Image: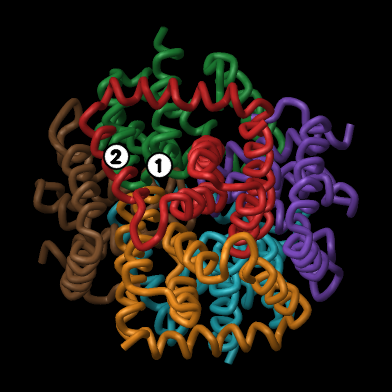
Chain colours: A cyan, B purple, C red, D orange, E green, F brown
Amino acid sequence: MISDHKEFAKEVDARAANLFKATPDTMRAFRGLMESAGKDGALDAKTKELMALAIGIAVHCEGCINYHTREALKKGANREEIAETASVAIEMGGGPAAVYGAQALDAFDQLSG
Amino acid sequence: MISDHKEFAKEVDARAANLFKATPDTMRAFRGLMESAGKDGALDAKTKELMALAIGIAVHCEGCINYHTREALKKGANREEIAETASVAIEMGGGPAAVYGAQALDAFDQLSG
Amino acid sequence: MISDHKEFAKEVDARAANLFKATPDTMRAFRGLMESAGKDGALDAKTKELMALAIGIAVHCEGCINYHTREALKKGANREEIAETASVAIEMGGGPAAVYGAQALDAFDQLSG
Amino acid sequence: MISDHKEFAKEVDARAANLFKATPDTMRAFRGLMESAGKDGALDAKTKELMALAIGIAVHCEGCINYHTREALKKGANREEIAETASVAIEMGGGPAAVYGAQALDAFDQLSG
Amino acid sequence: MISDHKEFAKEVDARAANLFKATPDTMRAFRGLMESAGKDGALDAKTKELMALAIGIAVHCEGCINYHTREALKKGANREEIAETASVAIEMGGGPAAVYGAQALDAFDQLSG
Amino acid sequence: MISDHKEFAKEVDARAANLFKATPDTMRAFRGLMESAGKDGALDAKTKELMALAIGIAVHCEGCINYHTREALKKGANREEIAETASVAIEMGGGPAAVYGAQALDAFDQLSG
């Protein structure tokens, strides 16, 4: 469980940058995929970021919860939206999603502070 | 892979009804969880349904894809929104999400027809 | 979704037998693991079979649901126990576990008939 | 990997309490689901707690392993039963379940000490 | 469980093509990711295809098992290599991987016939 | 996220050893499975270790990433091979695999240093 989400954000980004250097073509393609999937369309970018967060909670990925909470914050998501995203994840993931959804709320509280 | 989503919907519902009869307290509590997590709030009910669909794609649950595509349809989701939901799932789930995301689009096409 | 669990049982077993012939050392070791993990001990064999079924539901494995429902039946599990196993899986897995838990109950009804 | 399971238990509970405040209806419904799924029935409450632990191991959820080991302890589970629960998870989850099953045993040793 | 892998291959491809039409930018980016990740490098393309198959087995994705078995065949993989790929998946995924690994072998036998 | 992979390796091994003592028959059978699945055959042992690592990344198991990076190192895997293994995992697992793939590269850098 992550205690300092601002510090964790730096580690997540630093390691992603190392992987980018080690396998630039694949990571560039993946970045293209993220940009394409996440851009405003029939659904707006903030909604898509929350959707990515919901999946991050459902598949128990702490780094993803940190990253997509940050991105959702940048796109204007508020605390209620994070909590409701966690709620949908709990509907679809039960107890484990409650554990990781609580972590998303904690990430929001720390990163927005 | 599901070939007839209208027929599959009947099977999914019939089996859920059997489970409801066999374990009514738990299923009633779970239904309460679904209703609470899915209702209009900071995020609207259609968005939450698409979010549940995104998770269903990411965790490879055909019955969930069928059910949440139906519910998203009832709440007014259109084909572009289903396709963009699949896109976010692919960002978060790679190849397997492409397979199950394609199934969500197929479900939409059959169920909306 | 499986419509005929007796037929499905034959397919699951036939394919496992083919894999056994193709990679006998690994499959023999895996069978040893199954036997050791599943035998009577501090927990009895029926309870362990239901526990394996709970995991099969939680990880969305139809072949596992079929196989471990069969084994639980052989070890004397009844319909209430299958339904309660599904209930625990729903607590730990939400909507997808409801879908696959309903399949476990259906498997029991067909295989015990 | 968790080094202090008593400290971790406090964090898991504190974060769950925060999520409860942020989304009380959903969390109340989820608590109702836990209570209903976990109560004595055809299977006793201790067995159900161990079953929930087995799923927590199989889906790699450290917070769940901590929580359900605690609850299993309260309901009288002993060390052999935790080890056999891990064994069934390994049968159904291979190497990753060995890693998280070892964590369940460590949680038991720390929390029962 | 898939009974006809040649027919299933057509369905998988047809649905992917529909998704491609519905969300071309994301699918083009994903195709770029596949091509980059799968090309000859420090590891050869056949090995990478078998690695993708191993993951498809471990995450219980029938469409992925069909697709990556086909691609592995095109790149020269033989039956022993498919069986050993299934073996590694069983080491890392236990019983469910045995079920889906057996499906990979069946896919190979049908698609190479 | 693991900051010291050499220290983490000791913890992973110590806990596995404890589990071995608590449930020796199952762990001995599991070790037999690992040895059988991992030995030189149609695919060489290094390739199989990288395949196990790919699965460990795809299923988000930090202990597995640590262990199989160590074993891959012993069998002669180099940094490019680890990075390409991560790439295949990203193709098959999207964003979460990028997070855990970056951890595999970090593990390699620390453990080979």
Query: In the shown orientation, is residue C99 left or right of residue F78?
Result: right
Tell me if residue A83 comes above or below residue E57 in the rendering: below
What residue sits 40% from the left and 84% below the top? A7
Letter of the chain that mark 1 sits on in the rendering:
E
Category of crowding for the residue at label 2, using alpha-carbon neighbours closer than 10 angstroms: few (below 14), some (14–19), many (at least 20): many
Letter of the chain that mark 2 sits on in the rendering:
C
Task: Give the residue type that dot 2 points to.
Answer: Phe
Quarter in which the N terminus of chain A is drawn: bottom left
- Disc 2 is placed on an element classified as helix
Quarter of the image for residue E29 reads: top right
* Residue F24, disc: none
- Residue C66's x, y, as percent? 55, 36
Same-subunit check for callouts 1 and 2: no
Query: Disc count in the image?
Result: 2
Look at the numbered discs 1 and 2 and tell me whether their residues touch, using CB distance below 8 Å: yes
Quarter of the image for residue A113 reads: bottom right
Name the residue beneath numbered marker 1. E95
Tell me if residue C76 comes above or below residue A109 in the rendering: above
Front residue of C112 and D23: C112
Q: Can residue F103 be seen here?
A: no
- Disc 1 is placed on an element classified as helix
Name the residue beneath numbered marker 2. C30
**Spatial distance from mark 1 to mark 2, Cα to Cα?**
8 Å
